Image (cartoon, rainbow, N blue to C red):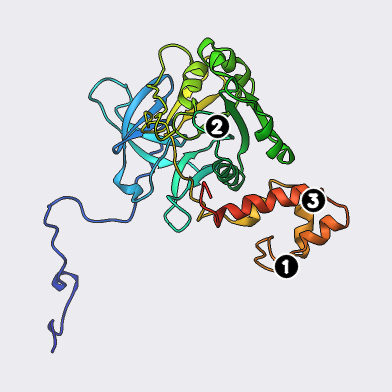
Amino acid sequence: MRRYGKHTDEDDIRQRPNPKGNRARTNIRPKHEDASEGFVLTVDRGRLTCLVEDRAVTAMKARELGRKAAVVGDRVSLVGDLSGRKDTLARIVRIEERKSVLRRTADDDDPYERVVVANADQLAIVTALADPEPRPRMIDRCLVAAYDAGLEPLLVLTKSDLTSPDKILEVYSTFGLNYVVTNREELETGGAADRVRERLDGRITAFVGHSGVGKTTLVNSLVGEGRQRATGHVNKVTGRGRHTTTSALALPLPSGDGWVIDTPGVRSFGLHHVDPSRVVLAFPDLVPGTEECPRACSHDEPDCALDQWVEDGHADPARLYSLRRLLGTRERREGD
C-alpha cells in the first residue's frame, strides 16, 4: 500500500514531532573552546568540587558526557559560573585523558570496576602494626592494584610503639618497596608527617588502608591546620575501625608542591580487572623471561618460562615467589 502520492517532495514527507518545541535534535556537540581547566577535589552525590585557579567551584557533569563520570584527581574543563560563590553551579564539559587510573572491584567475582582516583603517581598503603592487626593479604592486593595502575607503592606502617615492624618488613623485603615506619606519638606531634612528606613532594599520592589504621590522622598531620578531617577509633570487640571518611578528598601539601588524596577505609580490594601482564612490569628483572611464556600465561603454571629464567640465574627465586604470591591474591580472599 502506497503511503504517498506519485509526486512527493520534501514538504510531503512526515517528520517526527518535537514535543518540547525547542531546537532540532543533533549529534553535533559544542566544542566549548572557552572552557576553563579544573582539578576535581571531591565528589558528593553528583556534585563535584573542582579547583579552578585558586577557587573551589561546585559543578555538575554535562549531559553530553553521557555515562562518563569524573572522579577525584581528574583534570576537567568547565563552563558556567566559575566564581566559586555560594549557590552557584558550573558544568563539566570535558574530562581530560588520564595518565593513570587506580581501580578496584567489590570482590574478585564482580566485573564492575570502580575508579578510586585518577592521575595519581603514588599509592601509600597505610597499615597498622597492631590495633588493628596487620593483614598482609590486604597489602598484597593494594600492591597488585598499584602495579596494575602504574603507580609507585609506598608502605606506611603505623603504631610501631605497640610492636616491632621487623616481621612485616621481612615479608616485603624482596619487593624493593619504599617504606616509612611511624608511631602514635609521632602522629600526634607531627614528626611522622615530616618523614612521610619527603616521599610526597611533587607527586599526587593516594592513601588507602583499613579503617582505624591511622590513615586520616596521618593525612591531617600532612596537610596542616584548616583542612583536617574527622577521625575514628578501633572497636575493642571486633578489632576493626569505624568508617569516618566517606568520600575521597584531594588536599594540597602546605609546600604547594604535591597533593594527598584521602580515600575511605576499605574492607576488601577486589582484583577482577587485573591483567597479570601489567603486574609483571613491576618486576623488571623478570620481564625478559616472559618472552618465552605461552600465550596468555598466568605466570604460575607448569610451562611458565619464568621457572627456567630463574634457574638460569637471571633473577632471584625470591622475586619470582613474590610475583606469584601477588598474582595468587586474585584466587585468595583477604584474610585467608
Q: Amino acid at mark 1?
A: Pro
Q: Is residue 321 above or below residue 166?
A: below
- The secondary element bearing badge 3 is classed as helix
Marks 3 and 1 sit apart, C-alpha to C-alpha, by 16 Å
Task: Tell me the residue that label 3 is attached to.
Answer: 317
Question: Looking at the figure, which quarter contains the N terminus?
Answer: bottom left
Name the spot of residue 223 as percent of width and height, x first: 49, 17
Quadrant of the rendered image containing residue 151 = top right
Q: Amino acid at mark 2?
A: Thr
Instruction: Please report the residue visible at 77 percent of the width from the left and 52 percent of the height from the top.
Output: 286
Q: Is residue 100 above or below residue 331?
A: above
Left or right, 56 with respect to 19, comes to: right
Q: Is residue 104 above or below residue 118?
A: below
- The secondary element bearing badge 1 is classed as loop
Question: Foreground: 66 or 48?
Answer: 48
Left or right, 87 with respect to 306, comes to: left
Instruction: Indicate which disc residue 302 carries.
Output: 1
Marks 1 and 2 sit apart, C-alpha to C-alpha, by 35 Å
